[in-house]
Image (spheres, rainbow, N blue to C red):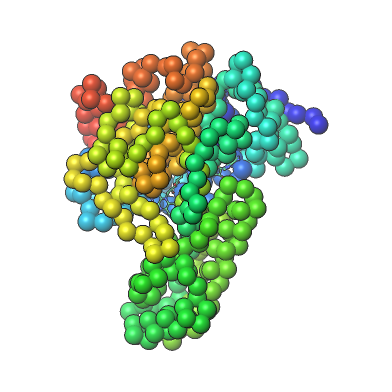
Amino acid sequence: MKYLKDDVDVLVIGGGAAGTIAAIQSARLGQRIALLESGSQLGGVTTTGGVSFPGLFHAWGRQIVAGIGWELVTKAVALDSGQMPDFSVPPLRHWWHQIRINGPVYAALAEETCLQSGVELHYYEIPTEVSENKNGWRVKTVGKGISRLITTKQLIDCTGGADIVGAIGLLRLREEETQPGTLIFRLAGYDVESLDEGIVQANFIAAMEDGRLQHGDISNPQGRFINFLGSGGENAQHVFGADSSTSDRHTKTNIAGRQSLLRILRFVRSLPGCENACVMKAQAETAVRETYRIVGEEEISYQDYISGRIFDDAVSYSFYPIDLHDRDGVKPQPLAEGIVATVPLRALIPKGSTNLLVAGRSVSSDRLANSALRVQASSMAMGQAAGAAAALSASQETTPSQIQIAELRELLLQHQAIVPIPEVTEISEHRINAINQCN
Ligand SMILES: Cc1cc2nc3c(=O)[nH]c(=O)nc-3n(C[C@H](O)[C@H](O)[C@H](O)COP(=O)(O)OP(=O)(O)OC[C@H]3O[C@@H](n4cnc5c(N)ncnc54)[C@H](O)[C@@H]3O)c2cc1C
């Protein structure tokens, strides 16, 4: 087989919330970067999965995630005449501080920013063989009609399921039953105000009993179906056993999501007053919440998360309720007032590895901590930290565990990130104020 050859400083695999930001950050630090993405665009769950409401960038009245992720999100809002929530007061419901963005606009802006930064983009391409050598890594890939051999000093696994870490044979963790996924769609063509709630609910109960609807078609099985209709069903369905870690499992997951959508659509159209119900939008794939987590040099525990532990090598913040979805729906557990969790660099380094980082939802953490850490603002901040750490390691010809944390933090601050470290609190405050003034 004839391989196209490529030699880079940092190779990022997976262009979701974390990978896109990691690649841009490394490139802005002058490194040669390639980004492999198995899909057709950047953004992952944010765009292709349709979860176009990233959060949370703010906690307790102040910004805790900024940098490149914030730059892209604010640009996407501005270019789509969107609206930012009012961040000055803690919200009653955490999702009030999520930012509604237009997925395709975000994907296009992320792509433009990658290209402007000098990132080589390779869509429709996946690694087939990953091996370590004395200078870093050799990665063989396959795409449509091409094969490539990429040599790189540093590798960042942003596949969401730690695919590369698994392929190399390093430890990963997985629950027996993972959280359900969701096919994001929106129904329209009816007027909720004009519907009779009693009739709707009676029909819903009957449809659940006779199998026209199945458990998971509405994520809160005890819920009022009128509320589901009111939201157009957006992000209110659960696909049990959802899994994106192999093509076969992802195929099954997508089919299950679409079958559920058809059941829901047929049922809704059977309701009096909903005869013209239609699907206004539906994503091309079912979004997956949970597959594998890495075993890192440090594991962020539930206790670390809910106590807001500031790790010695903290590189970013994370703020979200503990948010574990299961067969009964989800009951978010908010953090106590004033608490903001942190992410240490060591949780981004697979245990015993060299020249390898991970960012995004497969960060080293226990399950409950992960249910909060996995969200988009946190993943973007981890991506930026991993991108800067990889760039620093590549330029110093060392491995991420050997870089100076102070130097990494200073680089991140120079690139508008917010870094949660006691000894640089004054600098962080300065940056936060500067960022707030810009917005
Ligand atoms: C239904 C649902 C609702 C959610 N709600 C919210 C919310 O309200 N707010 C919020 O902030 N977060 C929410 N989340 C969580 C959040 O969206 C994700 O956890 C986060 O986007 C994960 O980002 P990531 O970069 O780690 O992974 P992903 O977004 O999954 O990106 C991984 C990328 O890697 C690519 N890839 C995978 N394997 C390979 C490979 N072998 N080779 C090349 N490319 C590969 C994929 O195509 C993908 O583009 C939700 C998640 C789901 C599923």
Q: Residue at x 32, y 49 (%)?
A: 322
Q: Residue at x 65, y 35 (%)?
A: 127
From this view, report whether residue 390 is shown above or below residue 157.
above
Q: Nearer the viewer, residue 171 or 262?
A: 171
Q: Nearer the viewer, residue 344 or 264?
A: 344
The residue positioned farthest toward the front in the image shown: 176
Q: Position of residue 311 (x, y in %)?
A: 30, 28
Q: Nearer the viewer, residue 203 or 106?
A: 203
The residue positioned farthest toward the right in the image shown: 1
86 lies left or right of 351? left
- Residue 234 seen from this side: no
From this view, report whether residue 248 is shown above or below residue 125.
below
- Residue 368 seen from this side: yes
233 lies left or right of 406? right
Q: Position of residue 273 (x, y in %)?
A: 42, 84
Q: Quadrant of residue 252?
A: bottom right
From this view, report whether residue 253 is shown above or below residue 6.
below
